Image (cartoon, coloured by chain):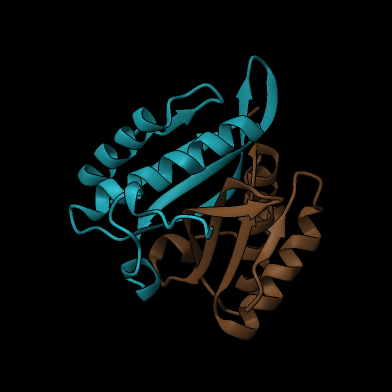
Chain colours: A brown, B cyan
């Protein structure tokens, strides 16, 4: 299973599609990000992937970890998000699509 | 249950302590962040909180959502991380402390 690498300029919908695709195949996915911009894109992609996978009946959550990666002889600390299935009532309450995001109060 | 609000300048250890404290009381916690810097701090705090709570025997994962918040008459999109308990083998394999983070290969 390949780790999905996200940068600060990654498109969230493309990353979300990749997460959903890997998850459907392996019932697990790993997403790696280095730096605040990349972590932010990764989290947004996971939110989108959740709605894609909810349509297939999967309830997912994720577990973040630190992991060291070597890039051009330098060691950098990345964050790895492990996407797992988790049958918790909290997830069942989730909106199925991003359009269901509650509107702000007027 | 109060939502734990994180900014880009929040100390991760302080936020992690707050998450662990709320989770111990309610078996649930909510962390809210607006912007890439804040989301990054929130994720790092959750990694730390996971190790704190693992010492108490809790296995946690989290579910991210978009949520709209109103700040000084403007609506902004925040990310809310809902911290839940999730008994998944992936979590059992987690290191109990950040010191167990695997070192990079030489």
Q: Is residue A95 above or below residue A79?
A: below
Q: Residue B35 or B47: which is nearer the viewer?
A: B47
Q: Is residue B52 left or right of residue A54?
A: left
Quick check: can you spot residue B28?
no
**Where does the image place residue A24, in percent across and percent down from the top left?**
64, 81
Which quadrant of the rendered structure holds the N terminus of chain B? top left
User: Would you identify the image quadrant in which residue B75 lies?
Assistant: top right
Q: Residue A84 or A79: which is nearer the viewer?
A: A79
Q: Residue at x 67, y 68 (%)?
A: A19
**Where does the image place residue A93, in percent across and percent down from the top left?**
48, 61
Q: Is residue A104 above or below residue B49?
A: above
Q: Is residue B96 above or below residue B76?
A: below
Q: Residue B84 or B13: which is nearer the viewer?
A: B13
Give the residue furthest to the left: B56
Q: Residue at x 20, y 52 (%)?
A: B55
Q: Is residue A25 left or right of residue A66?
A: right
Give the residue furthest to the bottom: A25
Q: Is residue A57 left or right of residue A45?
A: left
Give the residue furthest to the top: B72
Q: Residue at x 79, y 59 (%)?
A: A13
Q: Is residue B94 left or right of residue A5?
A: left
Q: Residue at x 25, y 37 (%)?
A: B21
Callout count: 0
**Where does the image place residue B83, in percent across and percent down from the top left?**
40, 50
User: Would you identify the image quadrant in which residue B31 lies?
Assistant: top left
Q: Is residue A65 above or below residue A3?
A: above
Quick check: can you spot residue A43?
yes
**Where does the image place residue B52, in percent across and percent down from the top left?**
26, 46
Q: Residue A97 or A46: which is nearer the viewer?
A: A46
């Amino acid at each position: 299973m390949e780790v999905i690498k996200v940068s600060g300029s990654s498109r969230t919908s493309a990353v979300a599609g990749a997460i959903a695709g890997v998850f459907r195949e392996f019932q697990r996915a790993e997403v790696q990000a280095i730096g605040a911009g990349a972590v932010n894109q990764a989290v947004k992609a996971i939110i989108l992937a959740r709605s894609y996978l909810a349509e297939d009946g999967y309830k997912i959550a994720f577990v973040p970890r630190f992991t060291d990666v070597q890039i051009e002889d330098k060691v950098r600390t990345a964050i790895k998000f492990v996407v797992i299935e988790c049958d918790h009532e909290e997830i069942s309450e989730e909106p199925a699509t991003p359009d269901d995001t509650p509107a702000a109060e007027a």
